Image (cartoon, grey):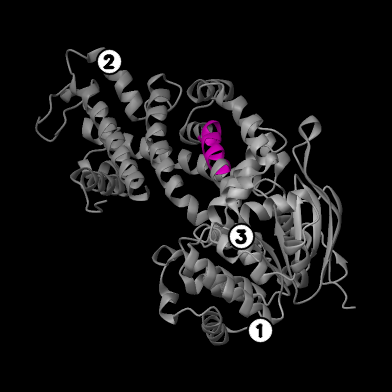
Amino acid sequence: MTAPLLSIQNLGVAYGSGRDRRFVLRGAGFDLAPGQVMAIVGESGSGKSTLVRAVAGLATPAEGEILFEGVALPPLGKRSKTMLHGIQMVFQDPGASLNPRQSIRTVLEEPLIVVGKLDGAARRRRVEELMDLVHLDHRLLDLRPSALSGGQKQRVAIARALSMEPRLLIADEALSALDFANQDKVSALLLELKERLNLAMLFVSHDMRSVRRMADHVCVIEGGQVVEQGPVAEVLYHPKSAYTRLLLAAALNPAAALADPRLSAALEAGGPISDEALAGVMDIIGANALMQEQSPS
Amino acid sequence: MSRSLSPAIVGAGVVGLFCLAVMIFGDALSGHDHRAIDLSMRLAAPLAPGHLLGTDELGRDVLARLLNGMRWSVGSALCATLIAFSIGTTFGLAAAHKGAWLGGALKLLTTFTQSFPSFVMAVTVIALLGDSGFWAVTLTLGLVTWPVFSRVVYAEASSLFQREYVQAAEMTGMSVARLYAHHVLPALVPTLSVLVVFHFAEMIVAESALSFLGIGAPLGAATWGAMLSEGRAFMLQAPWLTLGPAFAMVIIIVAAHSVGQHLRNLTR
């Protein structure tokens, strides 16, 4: 069996201190092999972004361990260059993830300067290669992010992440700020890059259609706890936990989801699902209505 | 938004150039030494021969004293602003970069210092120092007003470190110096430039107020505050002694505010 690229063991993340200390993620654990995609799904506020931010070094674990290539990951500021270059992230909002004062060329060239392996001419060539990799016109290089569409910005963000030649790419809701047409294009691009570069990916998404298309494995998180995980076909088509079934029902068949007694109870009394969680489920219903047509059943 | 220059900003530019000329040439521009006493020309009205803005009770040229006062007041306000900006920005940036304890300490310190009006603090410090003079006044004003900069810089830089493009830059292993130079400081320029200009206008008023109270400039120095204070005794007899420095202050403050307003509009 291939050694895991990433191994998360009993991971817990807490915010606040003293009496206000509250765990937003607890006991999370899974392995991810090189070149594999793990989708992290769950409603808003379930802790899926916290999980990937901990892997990226942007959140500090309160307990447990994250091993990357067999080595425990320290906080971001203490990571070795190999670790830093090995893990890169594409954020949710493409507009906020690019410095509005820099040209696209500078955005893509800066990580190469930090790595320091290439001279000026080689860097310029590499920037153009990166643009080719994400299917963007070289004429965009001298523009500011504000002149680009949402899909183009997200491609630039992907190219920036790839400039470090990572082994693990984290896509934190990287499709959710895009329109349907761009969601399809960018998810197709991510899939193509995964195959070409043998990238492992942590793919956080609300969109079950993209999850089914991209992921090899799925990890379902509810209220900061992993409730189910396994190969994509097993989790999506034969879900074991009630929560996974609810999420899928909401994604695949909104009408059925609304008829679910658990959701109707929550709708009536704010019941076992928090308001925030409910908003997450409603998000899925709205965003994935198209899934109804493509339901495997 | 129109980026054409308004008459106010053109006027502010002219005032700025005039200040620069005065800072370089001083009272030589008036053709008189601001300390030269001529008792035969006591309290001469404006437009008297050789004295465009008249003379004071010792026959000293008012224009020469105004220009010398501008050198003192503008110089002191500029230096005090620079001191407050340097200290405040350094502390604010240091506290914002993952300095949880430093951020807490800074908040406590600025809350404490800002609970006293800065002018009252300046008066107290100068009184305790028992010394007056350009650097005593300038350092005191700079040292009691830096929390204004640190609070703003801390708040803005803290929010910048939460922005995704800064986090993406951190994830590349970029040095802290490069992170500040390329991602944090450029984003702070619009806010800081407006703050600096408004702070400068405040420092002009504060320095003049200290001189007016007699605890700023040393005795006999020609500063706007001291000229206002001395002119009070001749308010009816020789109103130009108070009107001159009062108008000069108003012009500088209005010019500074016009520049600040223009910068604010540009960066909005």
Tell whether position A247 is magenta. no
- Kindly check if marks 1 and 3 are in contact, taking CB atoms under 8 A apart as contact: no
Q: Secondary structure at mark 2?
A: helix
The residue where tag 1 is placed is: A196
Q: Nearer the viewer, mark 2 or mark 3?
A: 3
Query: In the image, B137: left or right of B25?
Result: right
**Vertical placement of A160 versus B203: above or below?**
below
**Residues under numbered marks 2 and 3 in contact, where contact means CB atoms less than 8 Å apart:** no
Q: Which residue is mark 3?
A: A207
Residue at 49% over, 74% down? A105
B149 within the magenta span = yes
Tag 3 subunit: A
Residue at mark 2 to residue at mark 3: CA–CA distance: 77 Å
Q: Residue at x 63, y 41 (%)?
A: A278
State the image quarter where residue B74 is shown.
top left
**Element carrying mark 1:** helix
Does residue B257 lie above or below B9 as drawn? above
Q: Are marks 2 and 1 on the same chain?
A: no
| Tag 2 residue | B232
Do circles 1 and 3 both sit on a common chain? yes
Say which of marks 1 and 3 sits in front: 3
Q: Amino acid at mark 1?
A: Arg
Q: Is residue A28 above or below residue A108?
A: above
Crowd rating for badge 3 (residues with CA inside 10 Å; few <14, some 14–19, many 20+): many
Q: Chain of mark 2?
A: B
The quadrant in which residue B144 appears is top right
Q: Is residue B89 visible?
A: yes
Around disc 2, counting alpha carbons within 10 Å, would you say few (fewer than 14), some (14 to 19), or many (20 or more)?
some
Q: What is the span of residues highlighted in magenta in the rendered image?
A: B142-154
